[in-house]
């Protein structure tokens, strides 16, 4: 399937944009979960936050890889382009 240069779902720049979108999404969800459970950032909780952020990055990388494997342009790709200042 041929894509225009602008709508290539497997270009390296677009994959970085997708990773950024998913990372923002998962970090926001993690922050909300911390807010709901009232985890404070005092004491040993910095280790917990570090592990949480690392797991968010791993999950974002996994979801980005799965999304890129499909190779189709969809609304998630449009959101990633809009979030980073590009136009769909």
Image (cartoon, rainbow, N blue to C red):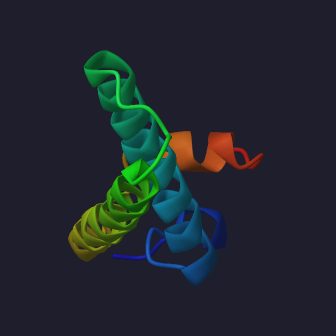
Above or below, 51 against 41 in this view is below
Name the side, left or right, on which 5 lies relative to 30. Answer: right
Front-lying residue, 64 or 2: 64
Tell me the quarter of the picture where residue 83 sits. Answer: top right
Name the side, left or right, on which 3 lies relative to 71. Answer: right
Q: Residue at x 50, y 71 (%)?
A: 15
Front-lying residue, 76 or 40: 40
Q: Is residue 33 visible?
A: yes
Above or below, 48 against 68 in this view is above
Residue 71 in percent (x, y) is at: 30, 70
Q: Which residue is drawn at 30% across and 17% down?
A: 36
Tell me the quarter of the picture where residue 67 sits. Answer: bottom left
Name the side, left or right, on which 18 lies relative to 52. Answer: right
Q: Residue at x 35, y 61 (%)?
A: 60
Front-lying residue, 42 or 80: 42
Above or below, 80 against 19 in this view is above
Q: Can residue 75 be seen in this view?
A: no
Q: Residue at x 71, y 44 (%)?
A: 87
């Amino acid at each position: 399937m041929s894509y225009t240069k602008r709508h290539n779902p497997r270009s390296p720049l677009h994959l970085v944009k997708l990773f950024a979108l998913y990372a923002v999404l998962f970090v926001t969800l993690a922050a909300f979960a911390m807010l709901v459970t009232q985890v404070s950032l005092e004491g040993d909780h910095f280790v917990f936050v570090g592990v949480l952020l690392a797991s968010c990055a791993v999950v974002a990388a996994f979801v980005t890889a799965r999304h890129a494997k499909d190779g189709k342009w969809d609304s998630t790709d449009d959101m990633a382009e809009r979030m980073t200042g590009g136009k769909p």
